[in-house]
């Protein structure tokens, strides 16, 4: 049993760190053959694992439309998707393929077009740079006329509205300590995370006492429709490239102990979760392969489990998503095949090497 409050600065147990480092260093060929990695998209693998059980199903078709009538739900997905649990970590619910192709594309566009362009949502870059939000506006000299996309979030402000060759710079707050960089450098590598709603203070490891910006209503509705036990109030959007990792940690700064939701978009990852031997002889650590569209719900006794990302697997982004933000000829979006190149053609393939992880939590009881 976990005793509260927990120390946000505490280091993970040594045996769990060793487990994490093993998968962090494992080569791609060995990862593909490792029978201990649980892949919930592999039905044969699941049938042979007697510790994994189906605990219920989520009605995907019941995910409601947003109040703006820009749908994050899809009528083309399977009506129900199973939710699984491993005996070693009760309360950790894994929902493979929760989001259809259309839903993933739409969610990604909201996060990286609309929400990144909103100055209320802070990023890792804000600490040392002035963010030139005017770059989010459409530059008619550089860009083609916006196409009539059915998911019209693509017609709004976005840093992707600028050409990758744009030479306007992000200027450092302290020029003696940091160098300026371009929009291409910002989107390709410098941008590591975005906070939505409650703006988490990474240095003090707490949420500010000031009232937070409103959590995006449509994204909040999607998450709550799928996981009604929790109220989305804050989120961290992590942007990964191959070679990136996320060290083992626990999310303990929230005053609420309701579950955490994690949604994966893009490249596959190896996700490590567990408690280590200090939690008892029966405690387990698991290595999970998470794919685009998968969701996790960390609740109950697994709410405060240690977790981290040991690897991002290159060349695993689904082909239909790897063209984002340029129009896709694979994903079955309404009118997708009738659209011209669109304003984001210069950024085609940006998503091919990326993994985007949306981590949602409830801050207060």
Image (cartoon, rainbow, N blue to C red):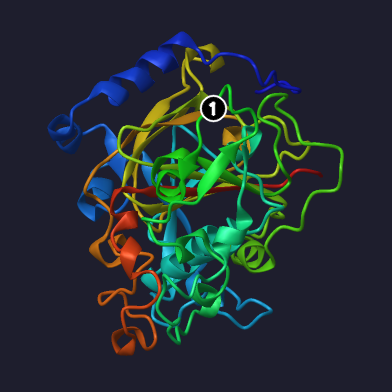
Give the residue pinned by disc 1: 178
Rendered position, 158 above or below 151: above
Q: Is residue 151 left or right of residue 205?
A: left
Rendered position, 12 above or below 255: above
Residue at the image point whose x is 42% and y is 60% from the top: 82
Task: Choose top left, top right, bottom left or bottom right for residue 123.
Answer: top right
Task: Give the position of the N terminus as an image quadrant.
Answer: top right
Task: Give the position of the C terminus as an image quadrant.
Answer: top right
Circle 1 residues within 10 Å: few <14, some 14–19, many ≥20: few
Q: Position of residue 102 (x, y in %)?
A: 41, 73
Residue at the image point whose x is 58% and y is 22% from the top: 176
Q: Position of residue 157 (x, y in %)?
A: 57, 68
Q: Position of residue 76 (x, y in %)?
A: 39, 81
Q: Position of residue 300 (x, y in %)?
A: 63, 39
Residue furthest right in the image: 210
Q: In this rendered view, identify the residue nearer to me: 144 or 282.
A: 144
């Amino acid at each position: 049993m976990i005793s509260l409050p927990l120390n946000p600065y505490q280091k993970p147990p040594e045996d769990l760190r060793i487990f994490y480092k093993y998968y962090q260093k494992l080569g791609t060929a060995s990862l593909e053959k490792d029978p201990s990695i649980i892949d919930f998209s592999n039905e044969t693998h699941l049938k042979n694992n007697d510790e994994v059980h189906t605990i219920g199903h989520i009605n995907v078709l019941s995910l409601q439309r947003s109040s703006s009538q820009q749908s994050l739900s899809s009528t083309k997905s399977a009506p129900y998707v199973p939710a699984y649990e491993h005996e070693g970590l009760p309360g950790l619910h894994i929902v493979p393929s929760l989001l259809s192709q259309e839903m993933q594309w739409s969610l990604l566009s909201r996060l990286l077009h609309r929400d990144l362009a909103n100055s209320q949502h802070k990023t890792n870059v804000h600490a040392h740079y002035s963010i030139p939000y005017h770059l989010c506006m459409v530059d008619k000299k550089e860009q083609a006329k916006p196409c009539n996309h059915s998911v019209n979030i693509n017609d709004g402000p976005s840093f992707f509205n600028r050409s990758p060759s744009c030479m306007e710079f992000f200027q450092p707050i302290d020029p003696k300590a940091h160098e300026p960089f371009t929009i291409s450098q910002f989107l390709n590598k410098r941008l590591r995370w975005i906070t939505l709603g409650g703006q988490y203070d990474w240095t003090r490891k707490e949420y500010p006492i000031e009232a937070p910006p409103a959590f995006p209503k449509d994204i909040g509705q999607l998450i709550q429709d799928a996981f009604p036990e929790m109220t989305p109030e804050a989120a961290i959007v992590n942007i990964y490239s191959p070679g990136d990792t996320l060290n083992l940690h626990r999310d303990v700064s929230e005053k609420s102990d309701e579950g955490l939701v994690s949604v994966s978009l893009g490249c596959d990852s190896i996700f490590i979760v567990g408690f280590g031997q200090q939690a008892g002889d029966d405690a387990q650590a698991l290595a999970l392969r998470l794919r685009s569209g998968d969701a996790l719900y960390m609740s109950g006794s697994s709410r405060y489990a240690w977790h981290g990302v040991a690897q991002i697997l290159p060349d695993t982004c689904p082909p239909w998503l790897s063209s984002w933000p340029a129009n896709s000829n694979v994903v079955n979006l309404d009118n997708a095949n009738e659209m011209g190149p669109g304003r984001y053609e210069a950024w085609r393939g940006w998503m091919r090497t990326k993994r985007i992880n949306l981590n949602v939590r409830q801050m207060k009881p």
